[in-house]
Structures are given as C-alpha cells and as structure tokens.
Amino acid sequence: MAPLIESTLDASEVSPTRDNMAPTGLPDVLPTARLNHRGVPIRSIRDELRRIPNGRNAITVLMCLAQSFGVVIAAAVVNTWWSYLAAFVLMTRGHACLNILAHEAAHRLLFSKRWANDTVGRFLLAYPTYQAFLAYRRAHFAHHRDELGPEEPDSALYAGYPVPFASWRRRLVRDATGQSGWKNMKSLGHAIRSGRTEALMIVGVQLGMLAASIAFQRPVAYVVWIVSWMTVWKVSNRLRAIAEHGGMIRSRDRRETTHVIKQSLVARYWMVPYNTGWHLAHHVDMGVPFRHLPQLHAELVDSGWVTPAIEYPTYRSFWKAVSSGTTNG
C-alpha cells in the first residue's frame, strides 16, 4: 500500500556496502500444477481465493471503527489525562486499521458492490485518516503495475536501503516528532488552495469530526486524533512500508520487489493488521482479498517458490538489516 510518507534521500545516507536488499539464489520452480509462471493460482483455486466475504467484511469495518473512533470516544467519556494518553498510543493501531482497510477498498476488495466499497472506503476509512482515496487508488495501481519501475510513486521512499544507522534514526525521528506529518499537511493545504475536490472532502470530514468534539466539550479528543496520526502513526507507517519494499529492485520476479517477513501476533496487532504483512502474496495477485492472503502465501511456500532463505524471522531482524547492511541472500 502507498505509505503516505514524505521522504528524502541524499548520497550520504546510502549504504557504502550494498545498494539493495534483494535476495539472491532464488529457486526456479514455477510453473507448478497449482501455480502459473508468475505464482498466480490456476483458475479453480484463484476463483475461490478472490471471493469477497461481504458480511464478514462489514463486521470487520465496524470493529475497525470501534478500534479507532471508539477508542478516542471512550477516552473523551472518561476525560482524564491517562485516558487520552492511552488513546494516543492505541491510535497507532487505529490509524493502521483505517488505512489498511481503505487500501482494501482502493483495490475494490472490501465489498462486491462498488458503491458500497467506495463510499465506505472514502468517507469512513480514508478521509478520517487524511488519505485521498481516489488519488491514492490511481497512484497505487501504478505501484502494482511495475513495482520500483519508472512510474513507481514511492521510489524515493524505497530507494537506497540498507542505510547507515544514523540515517535510519534521523528518518524515524522526523516521523516521531511530526516533521513528516507536517509536510503531508502542507501538501493537503496546497491541494485545498488549488480547489481539488477530494482535498475539500477530506477537510469537510475533518471539520465534522472537530465540530463534534467541540459540541461535546471534548476538543482534546480531536487533538489526540490528529497528533497521533502525525507522530506514532507515521513511525509505524514507515516501519511497515520499508518492510514491504525497502531496498528491493525492479524485477518480473516479485521475490525481488517485495520482502517476506514472518508474521507475529504482536506485529499483526500494532502494525500489519488484516493480513497486510503477507505482502508478497498481495503482489503476486492483487485481486485476492486480505482474508485469503495467508492461503495464497501457503501455496507459494508449498510450491518451493518462497523458501526460508528469503524470509526474515521477525520485523526486528529486518529493521536491523535495514540499518546495518546485513541482508537475506
């Protein structure tokens, strides 16, 4: 998914030891009886994997709203410093949930009815967390057409890894202190001044949220919402985004464009909910809804195409490689 991160890179921040993190020595085992030469399942398997479970997804959306809006509303009801602090921390997950389900809707995989998919995706998931849904969809499809190619919208973010630890730390500090978020806000302000319809819609939703917090005499609730987005969410978002494509290369073999990292319960809760951590499977077939990505990943492993040699055992081991120059392969 597009990371919505403001990123800069200069020559001093590039690792002097290796210019990418793509694995080497990849086994050539495709096609198989179940997968084609690109890793996409054969028709009978693919049709089942691409089925959209509308009812379950509706419940998922409601639970997502409870873990984002609900968390901040609960803090406002309690109305103590510690309740707002707890909401600030928990919104690390809250914003992740909103963004990732908006990503699902951008792929038209949240609901089979397009009007429901896009209405929920835009007004309940994307706009509350400052994501320009329609513009994001266009840019994100460019990302999927040719990962890390000349039209990659996030090439500046993914390039140059591994990096020296000092550079990695500077980037995370910029995120944690709101500097990256402020750049995004300035971009939103420019879009508003230019009269872009979607930017105005985002502002309309945000003004509605602010007005509600003031009407209930809890304006600090909206402050928690926006400050968490500009700080802890930005750190989480960068950590996830780099773990997806940081330092990889343009290739027809998606094992060279997308990292494989073993999924833990803690990571799935805080940073990669809704199976988004099975990201190689998502890039092999972007028409597979999030619920079925673990199944597709299992198919890739069973075929011998994804091996333990290209899988990082934890996100922590990956981030260590990002900032030390030690990579898989």
Image (spheres, rainbow, N blue to C red):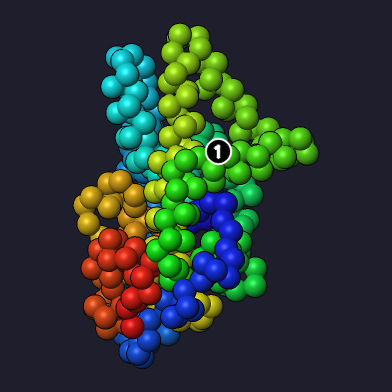
Looking at the image, residue 262 lies above or below residue 188: below
Specify the amino acid type for callout 1: Tyr
Left or right of residue 182, residue 310 in this image = left
Q: Position of residue 41 (x, y in %)?
A: 37, 75
**Taking the image as drawn, is residue 269 in sight?**
yes
Looking at the image, residue 10 lies above or below residue 58: below
Q: Where is residue 157 in the image (x, y as percent from the top left)?
A: 54, 61
Question: 34 or 308, which is in the foreground?
Answer: 308
Left or right of residue 170, residue 183 in this image = right
Rendered residue at 63%/30% (across/down): 203
Looking at the image, residue 57 lies above or below residue 77: below
Q: Mark 1 points at which residue?
A: 130
Rendered residue at 25%/63% (across/down): 314
Looking at the image, residue 182 lies above or below residue 220: below
Question: 296 or 226, which is in the foreground?
Answer: 226
Q: Position of residue 129 (x, y in %)?
A: 50, 37
Q: Position of residue 250 (x, y in %)?
A: 53, 78
